[in-house]
Image (cartoon, helix red, strand yellow):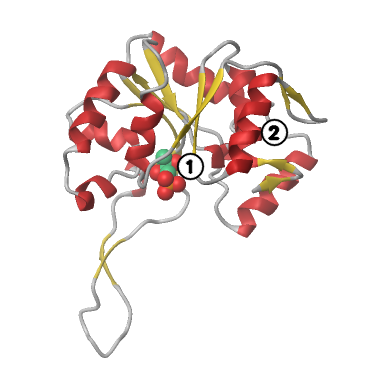
Amino acid sequence: MPVAGVAMLERAIGSVADALPGARIVAVVPAGHPGLWQLCRTAAAGTRHDDCVTAGLDLVAVAGGATRNDSVRAGLDAVGDAEHVLVHDAARCLTPPAVFAAVVDALAAGARAVVPALPVVDTIKTVRAAPDPAIAAEAVDSTPARSGLRAVQTPQGFRRAVLVAAQRQVAAWPAERAEAVTDDALLMEMLGEDVYLVPGDERALKITTELDLMLAEALIAAGEEHS
Ligand SMILES: C[C@](O)(CO)[C@H](O)COP(=O)(O)O
């Protein structure tokens, strides 16, 4: 998906390279998407756009799997023996360097799991099935206190050995249980690890809807990306 004319994945790779110069980047891409593989080869060789520069990166591309966890495992197999690893969504391609730095700093301070987070502005409800079958709508089950809720983003940082061990366990789980793991931090929580929060950034939005895309392109037009 292009964002203001540059592929989202390429922007994400560029932002990681800017934030973490010299870091090994593993791009996990769908096996049957030759365009993305070519994009990774080009990024590894070095590319230049007006607003997105990469220059000969330590970048490898590996094939993703059927689920998020399968893809994370495929990426982990290619990261080498680094002490720490960051798992990032290409869809958060406008994540500013300060967010990467905050995650890396917390890992360096000894945290084993770190995620960027923002307070939520909406009141959030949990839901249950419709109590009256005549009304075709879910019903509210409960309302967690908003002050205790955070929306988490990526990059999510981990001591590599801990994430590898956790992902090995998930590989043995039934599909339904594994699919409920929508981020790696949740995996850490399930395993009793402390997950530390550092400040996220609204520009690290996960570009998912048409409206997100419009917002991302407006941020780029305003020169707000990667600042
Ligand atoms: C990891 C994440 O970005 C945290 O908010 C989110 O859970 C990713 O969800 P996706 O469904 O894999 O895009």
- Quarter-of-image position of residue 119: top left
Give the residue type that dot 1 points to.
Answer: Ala
Q: Is residue 155 above or below residue 126?
A: above
Write down which quadrant ligand 1 falls in. top left
The image position of residue 101, as x and y in percent, is: 53, 17
Q: Residue furthest bottom?
A: 134
Secondary structure found at label 1:
loop
Q: Nearer the viewer, residue 184 or 114?
A: 184
Q: Quadrant of the C terminus?
A: top right
* Relative to 3, residue 163 above or below: above
The residue positioned 33% from the left and 39% from the top of the image is: 70
* Residue 31: mark: 1
User: How far apart, in angstroms, are the residues tagged by discs 2 and 1?
Assistant: 29 Å
Residue 184 lies, in percent from the top left, at: 33, 34
* Residue corresponding to mark 2: 225
Q: Is residue 165 visible?
A: yes
Q: Could you say where residue 129 lies in the image, as x and y percent from the top left?
A: 23, 73
- Report which quarter residue 10 is drawn in: top right
Residue that extends furthest to the right in the rendered view of this protein: 50
Task: Tell whether 27 sits left or right of 112.
Answer: right
Q: Say which residue appears at 79% left-offset and 42% top-offset.
A: 221
**136 vs 168: above or below:** below
Total numbered circles: 2
**Front one among 208 and 134:** 208
Q: Secondary structure at mark 2?
A: loop
Three-letter residue code for mark 2? Glu
Give whichever of discs 2 and 1 has the lower sequence position: 1
Query: Is residue 94 in view?
Result: no
Residue 113 position in % (x across, y down): 32, 23
Looking at the image, residue 157 lies above or below residue 1: above
